[in-house]
Amino acid sequence: MKTIMVIGAGQMGGGIAQVAAQAGYSVILNDIKDEFVLRGLSIIDKNLSRSVEKGKLTAEDKETILGRITKSTSLQDAAAADLVIEAAVENMAIKSQVFSQLDVICPEHTILSTNTSSLPITEIAAFTKRPDRVIGMHFMNPVPVMKLVEVIRGLATSDEVYKTIETLSIDMGKTPVEVNDAPGFVANRVLIPMLNEAIFTLNEGIATVESIDNVMKLGMNHPMGPLALADLIGLDTVLSIMEVLHEGLGDKYRPCPLLRKYVKAGWLGRKSGRGFYNYQV
Ligand SMILES: CC(=O)CC(=O)SCCNC(=O)CCNC(=O)[C@H](O)C(C)(C)COP(=O)(O)OP(=O)(O)OC[C@H]1O[C@@H](n2cnc3c(N)ncnc32)[C@H](O)[C@@H]1OP(=O)(O)O
Ligand SMILES: NC(=O)C1=CN([C@@H]2O[C@H](COP(=O)(O)OP(=O)(O)OC[C@H]3O[C@@H](n4cnc5c(N)ncnc54)[C@H](O)[C@@H]3O)[C@@H](O)[C@H]2O)C=CC1
């Protein structure tokens, strides 16, 4: 495997492109607009500069890594990819469009993977004529820091494709963990209801934003509180995942109305400058 195309240059796609380029792969970073690709590249540049300042990389390494990433705003560029990692927004209509187009554009050997947080891999695979070559590759945020990749097989995913992705994840410095195709897989089945419950706690006036986060940081040693973590993930993504859990697993997983209200207001967390906290964008 030589060339990886990453679709979506947001916080996840940018991070995935960075670790893939650091692992020596040629990366095509794709988004719908040039400005989004440039924004993704500038975050990668900033991350690598920080590593240079800390003495973890040389300035020359940084340039070599950046030199492995090419920009793309056309899905047709996937014709050159051995693997595609899709990290566009958490929306089945968009993913279905992307996967059905990729199936036509990509050579037969190309593996099509998705970084979806919660959507069924088997259903995404069914938008292609190569369901045996479709797989879930679920990285955690922030990608350059977090070790886990959940690897999720669809019903038809071949053993060969699973093995390739397992090996690639290790090459990228990650630890793959195999989980079955079910709403939210393991990570988000367990994590996101906790974030939703923290939002209910806020909505019911039980404590302030800071107090809720402090309880979980000081009491449970979580590196960040649930409301700060929801802001990091993106409240639109948290809501999409809760909706998948709600639809697939029942009423226990009802999204908190305050979460819906924030998303409707465009308060999406760090990426929009406002969520449970305020940020500079
Ligand atoms: C929604 C889904 O589908 C699945 C998910 O991803 S769920 C979310 C999973 N992620 C989490 O739970 C994250 C929980 N939070 C944490 O682990 C930590 O708070 C954190 C890693 C984000 C920040 O750690 P911290 O110690 O508070 O801050 P800080 O000292 O600034 O950073 C620690 C290191 O991470 C790096 N880092 C932090 N944020 C980064 C980012 N966005 N990109 C790249 N590197 C980053 C820093 O440069 C620093 O690196 P060094 O060790 O080389 O110095
Ligand atoms: N935010 C998180 O903590 C995590 C998110 N994920 C998943 O990763 C995916 C991306 O999430 P984020 O990076 O957080 O979102 P984001 O909102 O930061 O970025 C998404 C990017 O996809 C682009 N995009 C939208 N439609 C596209 C298309 N048709 N073609 C190419 N690019 C397109 C957008 O312009 C945007 O730049 C989602 O499926 C999400 O569920 C997975 C793990 C963690």
Image (cartoon, rainbow, N blue to C red):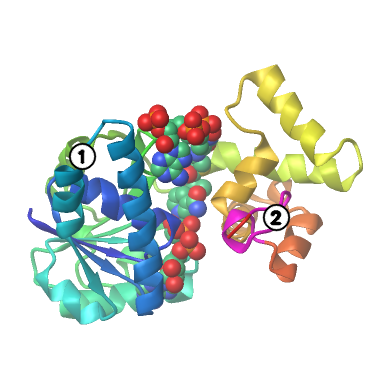
x and y, in percent, of residue 121 in the image? 37, 57
Magenta-colored stretch includes residue 271:
yes
Q: Secondary structure at mark 1?
A: helix
User: On the image, numbered disc 1 is attached to which residue?
Assistant: 166
Q: Secondary structure at mark 2?
A: loop
**Residue 79 visible in rendering:** yes
Q: Nearer the viewer, residue 160 or 1?
A: 1
Q: Residue at x 85, y 38 (%)?
A: 208
User: Residue 149's image quarter?
Assistant: top left
Image: magenta residue range: 268-279
Q: Nearer the viewer, residue 187 or 14?
A: 14
x and y, in percent, of residue 65 in the image? 18, 50
Q: Alpha carbon of mark 2 to alpha carbon of mark 1: how far?
A: 35 Å
Look at the picture and state if 166 lies above or below 42. above
Q: Which mark is residue 275?
A: 2
Ligand 2 within 8 Å of the CB at mark 2: no
Q: Which mark is residue 246?
A: none
Judged from this view, the residue extending furthest toward the right is: 205
Look at the picture and state if 14 lies above or below 71. above
Q: Amino acid at mark 1?
A: Glu
Look at the picture and state if 135 lies above or below 199. below
- Side of 107 relative to 135 (left or right): left
Image quadrant where one finds the C terminus: bottom right
What secondary structure characterizes most of the magenta part? loop
User: Residue 237's image quarter?
Assistant: bottom right
